[in-house]
Image (cartoon, rainbow, N blue to C red):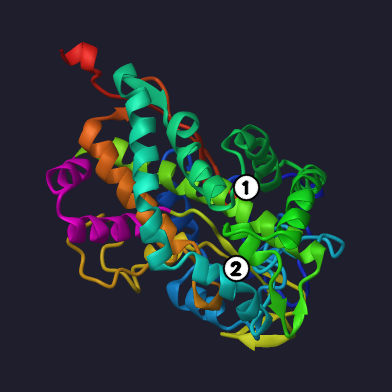
Amino acid sequence: MSHPNPLSLVERPSHVPPNRVVYFDLFDIPGADEDLALAYRAFQQDHPDIFWTPLNGGHWVATRAEDIEIMHRDYARFSQRRVAIPKSPDNVPAAIPLESDPPLHTDLRRPLTKALATAAIAALEPKIRELTVTLIDRIKDQGECDFVSEFAGILPIMVFLDLVDLPRDDSSVLVPMAHRMVRGQTAEARTKAQAELAAYLTEIVRQRRANPGADLFSQIVGIDVAGERITEADAVAYATLLLLAGLDTTVSGLALLMRFLATHENHRRQLVDRLGDKAFLRQAIEELFRHIGVANSGREIAYDFAYKGICFKKGEMILMPNMLLGLDERRVQDPLTIDFARKSPISHAIFGGGPHVCAGSVLARREFQIVLEEWLTRIPDFAIKPGTRAVVATGMVNAVLRMEITWPSASATG
């Protein structure tokens, strides 16, 4: 990897040994367009288990399963008060409840966990399935589509907007905002998008706090913590975080999963042949989760301490590329092979880990299973459109921005 412009680099702190410096740019990982897993794994295999990069404000990177799991769990040393790389300025409001630690995090998250529990999500399944079938039927006779804009970018968003009782038409405004906030090229662009999103949500939050309904927003924007109602600002931050999760991470996960199936016919065939076997399908999805990486985790060092011979300093940031937990040969045998018969439990961290594990994991798993059942029933054979390739962006959330796929249309086969 060529060294970036030195003007963009942070000077190596004196406590960072020169042999732990690696030029790792979270937003420009070589080879990500060809194979995201191999692109990340190259840094795991070719460099120290934990290294420091002078890019994006200067931060540590942990690449091995053992360390990633410890850092997920040990919030006393690896705090979630700040999670973004580059580190968010002090004047940027915390993302509630994500950027908080127990016991506050536990109290803030309790209504969200309840609202997204297995029983609640099971009740949503008919609506999710109906929407999935409608979207597939709309495009199946075309013989091709941009999977992101015509399917993955619609389904999870509509499901989320239904959950929070917002008009589905608002997706045309919210999706561009979320995109700029997550993948804006500058801190200024991301901050501006965050302000726009907060402005959109403030009036909604006020209405739900004054007259709560049965929707998800109503359940979280007026909660009491330690006997006091959360402030309006914290309620807006909470709603913002939920909206970003609903509008971005699931979209990215679906596109990454389908990108794998579009380029691996044998694995796709295995799923098609056993679509009626729900236990097999759930197991296969967990194995696919191990190989695709969506959100990365960031932590702030809470105080000065030594860890495995490394001197961490208070306020430094460390990144855990969650995909690398499932690609670590010290934890997973033959990690580059996707084996749908791999024994459970399958090690992966697609939903993070520890007390901050994604509260929406039950919903995401259900959506992924429904999509595979309904898509592969109607469009069992598909591939990346010849002459194109998926456009991938890396960052705190890895994403497929565009992916043109083709399949035999009814008119072509009839």
Magenta segment, which residues? 266-292
Residue 193: tell me if it is visible.
yes
Earlier residue among tags 1 and 2 = 1
The quadrant where residue 214 appears: bottom right
Which amino acid, by three-letter code, is at mark 2?
Phe
Name the side, left or right, on which 308 lies relative to 385.
right
Circle 2 SS class: strand
Q: Is residue 343 magenta?
A: no
Q: Does the magenta segment cover residue 287?
A: yes
The image shows residue 153 at horizontal and vertical percentages of 50, 37
Name the residue that disc number 1 marks. 27
At horizontal 66% and vertical 73% (from top left) the residue drawn is 80
Above/below status of 179 relative to 203: above
| Residue 297 position in % (x across, y down) | 58, 64
Q: Is residue 289 left or right of residue 13?
A: left
Q: Amino acid at mark 1?
A: Phe
Residue 268 image offset from top left, x and y in percent: 22, 42
